[in-house]
Amino acid sequence: MRIFFKVFVLILITSLILYGQEKIIKALEKGDINSVKKMIEKGVDVDTRVMRGWQESPGGPTLLMLTACGDDCGVKLTPQSQLSLFKYLIKKGASINAKTSNNETVLTYAVHGPHDIESEEKTKGGESLLEMVRFLLVKGAEINFRDDMGYSPLMYASESGYHKIVRVLLENGAREGLIESLESASYQGHKETRNILKLWFREIERSVKFNDSIPINRDNLIADLNSIGNYAQQYYRKPTSMGGGGNSFRGWKIPPALKNTDHGSFYILSIDLDEVIVVGIGTEIGVDIINKVKIKATILKDSMSINALN
C-alpha cells in the first residue's frame, strides 16, 4: 500500500512540475513577464526547458535561451521587457552556458538573429540584443565553440550581418570560425561586418607574424616531445616482466608530469605495436593565425620524426 501511495505522490509531483513548466513557457510566449517572474518566485525552475515534440526536455532550449531569441522563437516581448527579463533570469541563477541537444547556448540563441538585422542596428531591439550579448560575455559565457551545425557564435552573427555584435565578440576573444565568418559576411553582402572581420584578420595576422614567442614555443614543444619520445622508447625496450612493453608500444602512457607543461599539452593520437604518434598543442597562436602551435611526433623503436602542423 505504501509503495502505491509513494508512486501516486511521485506521479502527482511530476504532473505539477510539468504543469508549472508548461504554464511558465506559455506565459513567456505571450510576453507576460510578470507571470513568469511570479512563477519563478514560487519555485518553478529558472532553467526550465521547452517540452515540445520537436525538441523535448532536457535537450530543449531554456527560458533564458527563448528570452534571448525573442520573436524568432515566438516570444512576444518588447525590447525593454526582453532585456529586463533576461537580466532577471540570470540574477535568479539561470545557466548562461547550458546547452541544448544540438550544443546551442544562450549566446547562440542571442546572435542567431534575423538576416536583415544590419538594417535594424539602430533600433531599440538591436541595442537590446547588443546589451544582452555584452552582459553574457561579462558573466563568462563560452564564446569559442561550434554547435552541431558547425556554426560558432561569431559565424551566426556574421551571417546575420550585425556588425556591432561581431565587433563585441572579436573584442572578447572570438576566433572560432573567423575565416568562415569573413566568407559568409562577404557572400551575404554585409559590408560593415566584412570590413570589421577583414581588419581584425589583418591585425591578428600582423601580431602573429611579428611574434617572436611563436618559434620559441615551437622549439620548446619539440624539446618536450623528444623527452616524451625517449620515455616511449624506454618502455618499448623494457621487458614486460619489468613493467615495459616487451618490444611493443601498446600500453604506454605519457608520464603525468609531461602531459601538461609550461609550453603546452600533449596527447597520444594513435598507438600501435611498433609506432606511437604524440601531438603537442602550444600556448601561442600558430601560423594559421587561428589555432595554437601544433607539433606531431612519430615515435618508432629507435628513431623519431617531428612535423609542425601549425
Image (tube, rainbow, N blue to C red):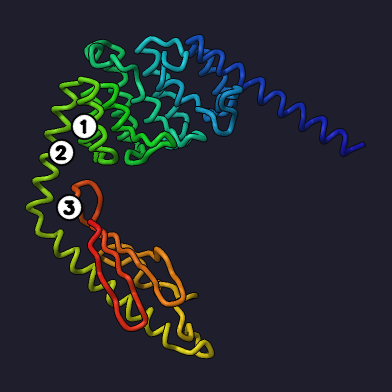
**What secondary structure is marked by label 3?**
loop
Between residue 186 and residue 168, name the one nearer to us. 186
Residue 105 position within the rendered picture, expressed as x and y whole percent measured from the top left: 42, 33
User: What residue appears at the point 57 percent right and 19 percent down from the top-left corner?
Assistant: 39
Residue 201's tag is: 2
Q: Residues within 10 Å of mark 3 (few under 14, many from 20)?
A: some
SS at mark 1 in the image: helix
Comes first in the chain, label 3 or label 1: 1
Residue 182: numbered disc:
1
Q: Earlier in the sequence, mark 1 or mark 2?
A: 1
Q: Earlier in the sequence, mark 2 or mark 3?
A: 2
- Side of 185 relative to 109 (left or right): left
Residue 307 visible here:
yes
* Cα distance in 3D space between marks 3 and 1: 18 Å
Q: Quadrant of residue 272?
A: bottom left
Pinpoint residue 103: horizontal percent, then vertical percent: 46, 37
Quadrant where the C terminus sits is bottom left
Amino acid at the residue labelled 1: Leu
Viewport quadrant of the N terminus: top right
Looking at the picture, which amino acid does disc 2 mark?
Phe
Query: Image quarter for residue 86?
Result: top left
Callout 2 environment at 10 Å: few (<14), some (14 to 19), or many (20+)? some
Q: Is residue 150 above or below residue 281?
A: above
Task: Check if mark 1's residue and mark 2's residue have beta carbons within 8 Å.
Answer: yes
Question: Residue 142 lies in what quarter of the image?
Answer: top left
Mark 2 secondary-structure assignment:
helix
* Residue at the image point whose x is 28% and y is 38% from the top: 177
Q: Which residue is mark 3?
A: 287
Question: In the picture provided, is 49 more to the left or to the right than 170?
Answer: right
Seen from the viewer's position, the closer of residues 300 and 231 is 300
Which label was assigned to residue 293? none
- Vertical relation: 282 (above or below) 66: below
